[in-house]
Image: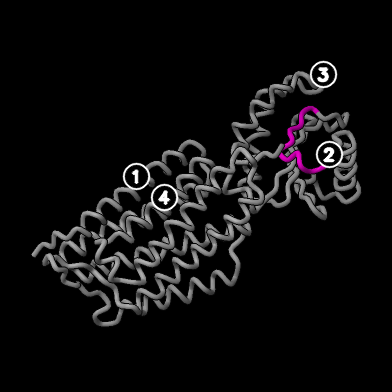
Amino acid sequence: MVNYATAVWVLFVTAALWITTFIIAVYRYRQNKYPHVMTISLVLLLNGISTTIRALATLWESASLGILADYLLLPGFIIIICFLDLILNDSIRPITIVILAILSTLAVRATFDVGIITFMTLPDGTKYLLENYDLTVPIVLFVFFSVFRSIQILIGLLKKTPKKLQVYPRVFLLATFLIAPVAIILYLSGYLDIVFSGAIWLISAIATNIIIISVVIEPKLAFILPIDIYKLIILDTNSGLSLFSHTFDHRERDFDDILFSGMMQGINTILNEAMNKGALVELKLAKALLITERSDKFPVACILITTKSSALLRTTLQAFFNAFLNDFSKFIARDNDVGQFDRVADLIPQFFAFVPEYN
């Protein structure tokens, strides 16, 4: 017997929302190749598939499909919580791994209980899929943990986000404090969710997708908290002349390019000649980190001043430096006319669009 409950159609609409946002995220990933967008895309796909299976489970009154839908929620929760940890700390903390392991174990263990999925008959004769509280509790704890991490990120964003991007933390505020709690209350109450025929899933999807679309559209949001990026400098390693520099964060005291180039030349000399350890790749200071790229063919080096290193920053700096050499190598060591490198500024938005700038 087919169960044409209102919740079935609400769940299908919710699944369509997840899949639509997934398509948007994949399109954005094909444009900019940011790893976090691909991570988000995977979560969106898992949620879309899980919600579709839940709709089918309700339609066909299948407990097995209901359990499968819940199984697919678990990796989505794990990925998104780890992603939030990375935004907040630039690493996944051990306590997060322990909490995720405990909640995942509780959820999987609950699925082996008899009657974990039931179908309640509604006044109109249709049926509604319900999980036993043994499964409900770990799922709700997953949601609480996600919301808690989101609030931490929101507080950080409100403090550090550049003025021109302040609209996004306000959007997060709307989703986190107005929509997410409603979904949690519906899920905990059970009865209210039945009355609203699966509204929890649609409300949760709306809240989550508001935040996700914001991060996908504006990639700077994922890099505001974990890393501070101060300045990019291109130096002539023979003369020590600064060929080009771009400051991302004007709140900090600016670096003197001439003094800076002299310091870099001295350090490279020590490494190459005295210690015979090769060219400088990274230099850790008390409150900053220097990431460098150097050409084997031309007397030029590129330096990014930041607080932390990452694979994305290194590959981006390398790609930027290669583009610089392709376009401007013919001007290197030509009459020390640094005005010839003014157009390097056009490469900044092409390669460093994800870096927030502060005036």
N-term-proximal mark, 4 vs 1: 1
* Contact between labelled residues 1 and 4, with CB atoms less than 8 Å apart: no
Nearest to the observer: residue 43 or residue 192: 192
Q: CA distance from mark 2 to mark 4?
A: 40 Å
Name the amino acid, label 3.
Asp
Nearest to the observer: residue 219 or residue 158: 158
Crowdedness of circle 2 by 10 Å Cα count: few (<14), some, many (20+)? some
Q: In the image, residue 71 lies at what x, y percent?
A: 34, 67
On residue 209, the disc is 4
Residue lying at the far bottom of the rendered structure: 114
Q: Report which residue position mark 3 lands on.
A: 337
Q: Residue at x 30, y 53 (%)?
A: 14
N-term-proximal mark, 2 vs 3: 2
Magenta-drawn stretch contains 155: no
Quadrant of the rendering where the N terminus is positioned: bottom left
The span picked out in magenta is 243-253
Q: CA distance from mark 4 to mark 1?
A: 10 Å
Say which of marks 1 and 3 sits in front: 1
Q: Report which residue position mark 2 lands on.
A: 255
Q: Report which residue position mark 1 lands on.
A: 20
N-term-proximal mark, 2 vs 4: 4
Q: Is residue 20 left or right of residue 296?
A: left
Q: CA distance from mark 4 to mark 3?
A: 50 Å
Above/below status of 222 relative to 151: above
Quadrant of the rendering where the C terminus is positioned: top right
N-term-proximal mark, 4 vs 3: 4
Name the amino acid, label 4.
Asn
Q: CA distance from mark 1 to mark 3?
A: 51 Å
Name the amino acid, label 1.
Thr
Name the amino acid, label 2.
Phe
Q: Residue at x 64, y 52 (%)?
A: 225
Residue 30 appears in the figure: yes
